[in-house]
Image (cartoon, rainbow, N blue to C red):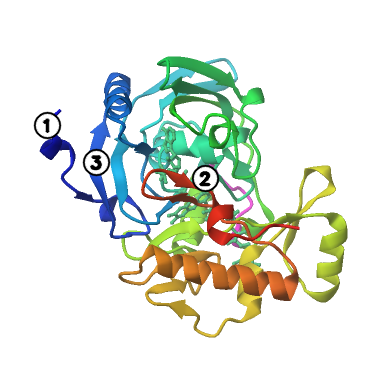
Amino acid sequence: MCKKKYFSNQSLKDLNTFAIDVTAKKVIFVKTIVSLINISKICKLSNIPYIILGEGSNILFLENYAGIVIINRIRGIKIIEKKNTWLLHVFSGEKWHNLVKLTLNLGIFGLENLALIPGCIGSAAIQNIGAYGLEFKDICQYVDVLCLKNNITTRINKKFCKFSYRNSIFKNQYNHEHAVIAVGIKLSKKWRPIIFSTLKKYIKQKNITPYSMFNIVCKIRKKKIPDPKKTGNAGSFFKNPIITKEKAQKLLKLYHVPNYPEINGLIKISAGWLIEHYKFKNLQVGDAGIHKKQKLVLINKKNATPQEIIKLAKIIHICILKKFNVFLEPEIDFIGSIGKVKSSDIFKLKNN
Ligand code: FAD
Ligand code: EPU
C-alpha cells in the first residue's frame, strides 16, 4: 500500500455537526457493502483504526483521528404494499429526514413526529432516535447488521434489538466491528396522530393531518434547536435522566421539573429544565456555550475545541449533581484518536 496516499490528513470539520476542526488520516465515502468490507479488511491487515459514520450528528471528536473515517453512503429504499401496512427496507446510508419527506409525499404516514432529525438510517436504529412521543423502535421491524470479522450479515428482529431510550444492542454487543446495513420499517395504513404532551399547545386544529403534524414538528424544531449548518451542535448533549419514583417525588416536592412516566414505574425528567433552572450566568468555556432556547444543546460558537466542550459539559454535570442530586449522562458518542471513548472515562464520575 502506498503510505502517502493513505496517510494524508483530511479535515473532519464538515463531517461532524459540532464542526470540530480535527483531522483523520483519511476519509472514505462508501456506496456499497463490498467497498465497506474491502476497506475494513485493508484497515485490519494494516493495523489502521477505522470508524463508520453517517452524518456525524451524534458525536464529539476529542482529538485528531489516527485512522480512516468511513462515511456510509450505502443507499436504496424498497417499498412493499401489504393489505393494512407498508413495509420499507431502507439501506443505512439514506438520510433519515429524506425518508420522512419521501414517505409523506407518497402518502405513507407515521414518521412525521421524527421529522428534521439529522443523520442516517443506520444511526437512527443504533441510537433508537426519538422525538415527540415516537421512537425508532415503534416502527422498526428488523435491523440487518454486518459482522466485519466474518462478513456475515444477520437480520435481527426488533424483539432482539434491545431497544430502549437512546440505546440498542448496536451500541453494546454489536458496537465493535459491526456495521448496520439496512433496516425494516412497518407503517400502518391507518394513521393516528401521536400528540405528545409537549405538542399539545401547538396543535390548534381539530383535524390534524400527517402533513400538518410534519409542519408543526419542523416549525417547533427550527425555533428551538440550532441549525448545525449555522451553529455547531450535536442535538441534546445529555440524556433526560430516568430516576426512581422515590427520588422523583423528593425532587418534585422542591421543583416543578417536567416529568414523564416510564415503564417499571421509573420517571424521566427534563434535563433541559434542570440546566435552565440552575441559572448559569452566561456560562461559556472558550467558544463552547449553551443554546439559549434549548439548554440541553451545547453549541460551538465559532472555533470551540473538544476540550472546551468537555469542560463546559463537566461544569454543567457537577453543578446539576450538586444542586438537584441528579446525574446527567451524555447522549452523544465520544471519539478519541483510535476509537470510541466511554463517557464514564471522560467524566470520571460514577452514578450512585
Ligand atoms: P453519527 O454521528 O455519524 O454516528 C453515531 C454513532 O453511530 C457513531 O458511534 C458511529 O460510529 C455509529 N455508526 C453510524 N453509522 C453506523 C453504521 N452504519 N454501522 C455501525 N455504526 C454506525 N436524536 C434524537 O434521537 N432525537 C432528536 O430529536 C435529535 N435531534 C437532533 C438535532 C440536531 C440539530 C442534531 C445535530 C442531532 C440530533 N439528534 C437527535 C442526534 C442525532 O441526529 C441522531 O443520533 C442520529 O441518529 C445520528 O445520526 P448520524 O448518522 O449523524 O450518526
Ligand atoms: N425545558 C426547559 N428548558 C430547556 C429545555 C427544556 O424548561 O432548555 C423543558 C420545557 O418544559 C419543555 C420540556 O422541558 O417543554 C421538554 O423540552 P423539549 O420538548 O425541547 O424536549 P427535551 O426533553 O429537552 C427531548 C429529546 C430531543 C427531542 C425532544 C422532542 C432527549 C435527550 N432529547 O428533548 O432529542 O427532539 O425531546 O421530543 O431525550 C436529541 O436526542 O438530540 C434530541 C434533540
Number of numbered tags placed on the structure image: 3
The quarter of the picture where residue 150 lies is: top left
Report whether the residue tagged 2 is closer than 8 Å to ligand 1: yes
State the separation of the CA atoms marked 1 and 3. 16 Å
Near mark 2 (Cα within 10 A), the count class, few <14, some 14-19 or many ≥20, is many
State the separation of the CA atoms marked 2 and 1. 44 Å
Q: Is residue 43 left or right of residue 344?
A: left
Q: Which residue is mark 2?
A: 114
Q: Which residue is mark 3?
A: 27
278 vs 43: above or below: below
Near mark 1 (Cα within 10 A), the count class, few <14, some 14-19 or many ≥20, is few
Question: Where is the N terminus found, in terms of image quarters?
Answer: top left
- Magenta-drawn stretch contains 206: yes
- Magenta-drawn stretch contains 283: no
Q: Position of residue 327 (x, y in %)?
A: 69, 62
Q: Secondary structure at mark 1?
A: loop
Using the image, tell me which numbered label, if any, was put on residue 2: 1
Near mark 3 (Cα within 10 A), the count class, few <14, some 14-19 or many ≥20, is many
Q: Is residue 294 visible?
A: no
Mark 2 belongs to which amino acid? Leu
Name the residue at 61% across, 75% down: 276
Question: Can you tell me which quadrant of the image ligand 1 is in?
Answer: top left
Please state the extent of the stretch shown in magenta in the rendering: 202-210
Judge by depth and name the residue closer to the eye, 207 or 273.
Answer: 273
Q: Secondary structure at mark 2?
A: helix
Q: Is residue 83 left or right of residue 225?
A: right
Q: Is residue 25 left or right of residue 177?
A: left
